[in-house]
Image (cartoon, helix red, strand yellow):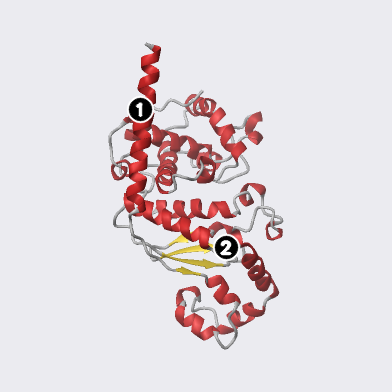
Amino acid sequence: MLKKICFFLFMLSIVSCNDASRTEAEIEKIDVNFKLIRFDQKFANATKDSLSKLKENFPFLFPEQYPDSVWVNKLSDSIQQELNTEVTGVFPQFSEETDELHSLFQHVKYYFPDFKVPDVITITSEVDYKNKALYTGDYLFLSLDTYLGEDHKFYIGIQEYLKKNFKKDQIIPDAAGEIAKEYVPKADSRTFLSHMLYYGKILYLKDLFIPDASDAEKIGYTRDELVWAQSNEDQIWRYFIENEVIYDTDSELYTRFLYPAPFSKFYLQLDSESPSRLGQYVGWNIIRSYMEKNDVSVKKMLNTSAEEIFNKANYKPKK
């Protein structure tokens, strides 16, 4: 009997791999075209005389409430010039990232055929880490000065839990996450479960959009943080159940378990060892469980209520 079970699981894995390979082969055939615009370099090379042409070509990057003198002064500002130098040093070319963006857009279009492929504009933003990547529909903006490496001198004074993701490898996961948000409806209630599954849906779309990325890259964990979450998933879930937080509507739970922070807040001695956003991690695995155990489309899942997903997911955390 054991041999039969092992053989069945082996054959199932082969079928699954073949299905994935066929899907990837179809995705590779999808035609996507977009412009990569190195606005960061264009601005770095601009002069007082050429500024008007730059404004004409990119009016949406020059808010009308600011007079030309602001931009002229910025051209010669020492901090801006140092930003330009550092960004060019880390990103002299953008060819590898462009290829990865091409693959990302192909995957999005496979699952959402109506997806309009945006032009990609690289900028500097004076390290505006709250807007590292920004998707507007027509454009995908990438602030390259927020991806220079977590130990870069520009990030001195920024908390470690934030700057650990200020690196090249996080560009594509950030872009995928911003696009995914466009397809995930807002939480359908104030319950912790609803908000947990909102983030779980975004992370599941990242599974589809960037399948070659690691789980750590998708959620923005270090490898050690992901291992901690995996090793303690059963204990995390037990805490949520025993403390009856699943259907709780206290918004403080979002801060404790869903938003970026130095760590998650169980109010236990182990808190400082834990990564933040463990509610997102659990929500992700609930969505994965739901999709594995129910024959539904991605679009159907996205529009299914949190309570129905939870009831049909039969989620059992790993011990």
**Considering only vertical position in the picture, is 112 above or below 120?**
above
Mark 2 or mark 1, which is nearer to you? 1
Query: Split into 4 quadrants, where in the image is the N terminus?
Result: top left
Task: Look at the image and tell me whether residue 264 can be seen.
Answer: no
Instruction: Pinpoint residue 173: horizontal percent, then vertical percent.
Output: 49, 50
**Which residue is rendered at x = 59% and y = 58% of the image?**
147
Q: Which residue is mark 2?
A: 144
Q: Residues within 10 Å of mark 1 (few under 14, many from 20)?
A: few
Please give the residue where the numbered disc 1 appears in the rendered image.
Answer: 12
Q: Residues within 10 Å of mark 2 (few under 14, many from 20)?
A: many
Does 86 sit above or below residue 310? below
**How far apart are labels 2 and 1 at the CA level?**
43 Å
Could you tell me the amino acid type at mark 1? Leu
Q: Residue at x 39, y 14 (%)?
A: 3
Give the amino acid type for the residue marked by disc 2 in the picture: Leu
- The answer to which quarter of the image holds residue 300 is top left
Q: Earlier in the sequence, mark 2 or mark 1?
A: 1
Q: Where in the figure is residue 196, as x and y percent of width and height?
A: 44, 39
